Amino acid sequence: MEQTTRGSQPLIVGEDEFMARLADEIVRSERYEHPFAVLTLRPPTGTRDFGDLTDRWLESSASGLTRGCDVVAVLDDGPMLIIMLPETDVSGAGSVLERLRSAIAADTEQEWEFGLFEYPENKVRLQELLEEAA
């Protein structure tokens, strides 16, 4: 799912590209002492057709709720949708997460799990998340 369209749309990439961009963002964050956030969205266990569901949802909902500088990936092993929000603190990420929750709730009755990590505040938890996703 290597897609490179930009503008006001988020960048949607594969897992390897996401991890490379995340590593770059960690370096940038530490250099300039600016936070960034990562959101995780997991469908209920046993969800069928996760790929079709996330593709449809990404095309309609996520693009209107995220910015052009944000990076989105679908990790099939989880399965999990993960969104990196550069230059975003926990408050801003919480606002985005609430809009995403509302969009998902309007589209499905299934209960998704959500996570929010701010770097560098959640440095250890973010590292655990990345190890789990790898």
Image: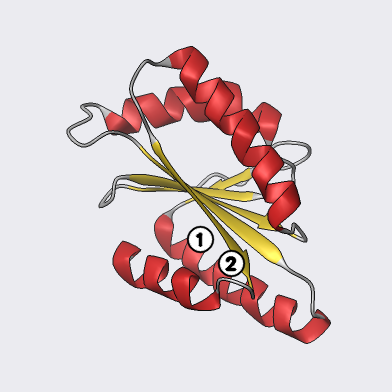
The residue located at (38%, 72%) in the rendering is 128
Residue toward you, 7 or 38? 38
Q: In which quarter of the image is residue 98?
A: top right
Q: Mark 2 points at which residue?
A: 21
- Cα distance between the residues tagged 1 and 2: 5 Å
Q: Does any portion of residue 37 appear in the rendered image? A: yes
Q: Which amino acid type corresponds to the residue marked 2 in the rendered image?
A: Arg
- Asked if 121 appears above or below 61 in the picture, the reply is below
* Total numbered badges shown on the rendered structure: 2
Give the number of the disc on residue 18. Answer: 1
Query: On the rendered image, what quadrant is the N terminus found in?
Result: top left
Query: On the rendered image, what quadrant is the C terminus found in?
Result: bottom left
- Asked if 13 appears above or below 29 in the picture, the reply is above
Q: Does any portion of residue 69 appear in the rendered image? A: no
x and y percentages locating residue 80 in the rendered image: 37, 46
x and y percentages locating residue 108 in the rendered image: 40, 16
The residue located at (56%, 71%) in the rendering is 122
Determine whether the residue tagged by mark 1 lies in a helix, strand or loop. Answer: helix
Q: Do the residues labelled 1 and 2 touch (CB within 8 Å)?
A: yes
Query: Is residue 16 toward the left or the right of residue 33 in the image?
Result: left
- For label 2, count other residues whose C-alpha is less than 10 Å away and answer few (under 14), some (14-19) or many (20+): some
